[in-house]
Image: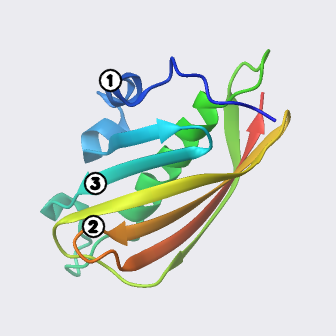
Amino acid sequence: MSVYRPAFDRDAFNETSKGFLPGLLGIRILEIGQGRVLAALDIRKEHHAPNGFLHAGAVVTLADTACGYGCVAHLPDGAKGFTTIELKSNHLGTALDGTIEAEVTAVHLGRSTHVWDATVRRQADRKTIALFRCTQMIL
């Protein structure tokens, strides 16, 4: 089983995000530790689809970023990185404003694959708006 490497803390990931899609969207890592990541996104108009609802891609990017950073922080010895080989999301609701959070937990931390689950919720009322699963291949 892979274990959390404390050098990969929230500040390191938030710095890494600058200039890339997670930073451009405003995704923030709030907490990271053994088998767990908590990330947030403050909703802006730019995160909405033209129909006025939160774009599913913004929700997926929040969850995928948190899962990816969790994978990086738990890479086994000798790994060079990872690539996502599958992701799935079920969208159950939406948020028009405020903040959404992705609470991410490791399901499997193997030497060749990782599997992470994310629950995306509205921060204000904790209502689940999406469920997400991501599988990564360790390189």
Q: Mark 3, residues whose alpha carbon is within 10 Å: few (<14), some, or many (≥20)?
A: many
| Residue picked out by circle 2 | 123
Residue 105: image location, x then y, percent: 60, 53
Q: Give the quarter of the figure containing the C terminus.
A: top right
Badge 2 density bin: few <14, some 14–19, many ≥20, Cα 10 Å: some
Q: Secondary structure at mark 2?
A: loop
Q: Earlier in the sequence, mark 2 or mark 1?
A: 1
Looking at marks 2 and 3 on the same chain, the residue that comes earlier in the sequence is marked by 3
Q: Secondary structure at mark 3?
A: strand
What amino acid is labelled 3 in the image? Leu
51 in relation to 84, above or below: below
- Callout 1: SS: helix
Type of amino acid under label 2 = Gln
Name the residue type under label 1: Glu
In the picture provided, is 108 more to the left or to the right than 27? right
Q: What residue is shown at x 39% (from left), y 31% (from top)?
A: 10
Give residue 15's mark.
Answer: 1
Q: Residue 47's quadrant in the figure?
A: bottom left
Q: CA distance from mark 3 to mark 1?
A: 15 Å
Q: Position of residue 43 (x, y in %)?
A: 20, 61
**Residue drawn 32% across the image and 23% down it:** 15
The residue under the point 75% across, 32% down is: 2
